[in-house]
Image (tube, rainbow, N blue to C red):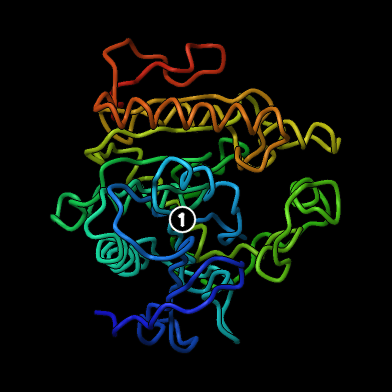
Amino acid sequence: MTATASAWEPDVLPGYWQRTIPLGADPHGEGDLVATLVRRGDAGPAARAVLALHGYTDYFFNTELADRFAARGIAFYALDLHKCGRSRRDGQTPHFTTSLRDYDTELDEALRLVSDDTGGAGVIAYGHSAGGLIVTLWLDEARRAGRAGAVTGLVLNSPFFDLHGPAVLRSAPTSLALIALARWRKRHVIRRPTPGGYGTSLHRDYSGEFDYDLDWKPLGGFPVTLGWINAIRRGQARLHRGLDVGVPSLILRSDHSVTEAPDPEAIARGDAVLDVAQIARWAGCVGDHTTVAPIADAKHDVFLSLAGPRAAAYAELDRWLDRFAAGDGVSTQGADGGRAGADPHSDIPTRRG
């Protein structure tokens, strides 16, 4: 159970408001936990709202995305998870967790607060990268438990559906070893921050267009721990067994990956973080009504892409929202599996296994 959330107060972003959600003592001994709900503009009745979730080494800062939803009359809210962005307190390991279920309480409470704030809006859940995996798993379980009746749609932006890299990293022996190591050395760092790369393609002080707090989203990323990656792998295993979020979903991704590319121009025109073929492979495990839209030359966060791909991503979002608002959340076209080169507007059936 959470304590009562704080009152709304001005956010670090002009024109935005934030509300702290107390979560109690950290089971890992790093003090008291909080999450932070962020709202664009003033409160008011709304028929629809979006609740957005960030990825790893990330927090909410993309006001352009919020403006696009607001222009359609959709109230915009974002959640900075505990130990992330606005919610990280002194002495806490950034983004650290050992189970993705640890986020269920703050997501439940954020959904309740959005519903109260808007007078019962239908909520579109949104997640990027690790946040895409987290929100998908939460929605599957919350709907089964009757806690997510307000959620009417799901938008995923390059969700972290599998571990990229050599196949041996995804093998059963590696998974078993990871579980054993994470039990005893959960804070052991297995990947340290790297200079340059994807982060420099985003921030306006380097080669990007966007301004954000480099303490909350450092260029080279936060260290990755055994405990966190084990939580991700367990969550991915749940996804791979097949879920049913129960609502229409849209999955946006780049049309190609550039994970090994040292060229800054290549990094600016592809997914430099995940293998998009893995996103395509597991997209059918989200539910029965899933639309996959590959975006040519998009970055890992498609809404932080260069101008052309970013406009294409917003066009796909608008197209899906138009269908969604018309009550046609899914068509009856055949499966495409989300492969680059296939019809990017087709819908795919649930894939188990």
Report the quarter where the N terminus lies. Answer: bottom left
Of residue 124 and residue 27, the one placed in the foreground of this image is 124
Q: Quadrant of residue 60?
A: bottom right
Q: Position of residue 119 (x, y in %)?
A: 23, 60
According to the picture, the residue beneath numbered tag 1 turns out to be 53
Q: Quadrant of residue 142?
A: bottom left
Q: Quadrant of residue 214?
A: bottom right
Badge 1 marks a residue whose secondary structure is strand
User: Which residue appears at 30% of the width and 32% of the height?
Assistant: 325
Of residue 259 and residue 298, the one placed in the foreground of this image is 298
User: Which residue appears at 59% of the width and 86% of the height?
Assistant: 91
- The answer to whether residue 304 is left or right of residue 15 is right
Q: Position of residue 176 (x, y in %)?
A: 43, 53
- The answer to whether residue 255 is left or right of residue 219 is left
- The answer to whether residue 102 is left or right of residue 262 is left
User: Which residue appears at 43% of the width and 65% of the height?
Assistant: 42
Q: Position of residue 103 (x, y in %)?
A: 37, 65
Residue type at the position of mark 1? Leu
**Residue 302 vertical position relative to residue 128 in the rendered view, above or below:** above
User: Which residue appears at 34% of the width and 80% of the height?
Assistant: 5
Of residue 77 and residue 276, the one placed in the foreground of this image is 77
Q: Badge 1: few (under 14), some or many (20 or more) residues near its Cα, within 10 Å?
A: many
- The answer to whether residue 283 is left or right of residue 204 is left
Can residue 267 be seen here? The reply is yes
Of residue 256 and residue 323, the one placed in the foreground of this image is 323
Can residue 104 be seen here? The reply is no
Q: How many marks?
A: 1
Q: Position of residue 113 (x, y in %)?
A: 30, 67
**Residue 211 vertical position relative to residue 349 in the rendered view, above or below:** below
Report the quarter where the C terminus lies. Answer: top left
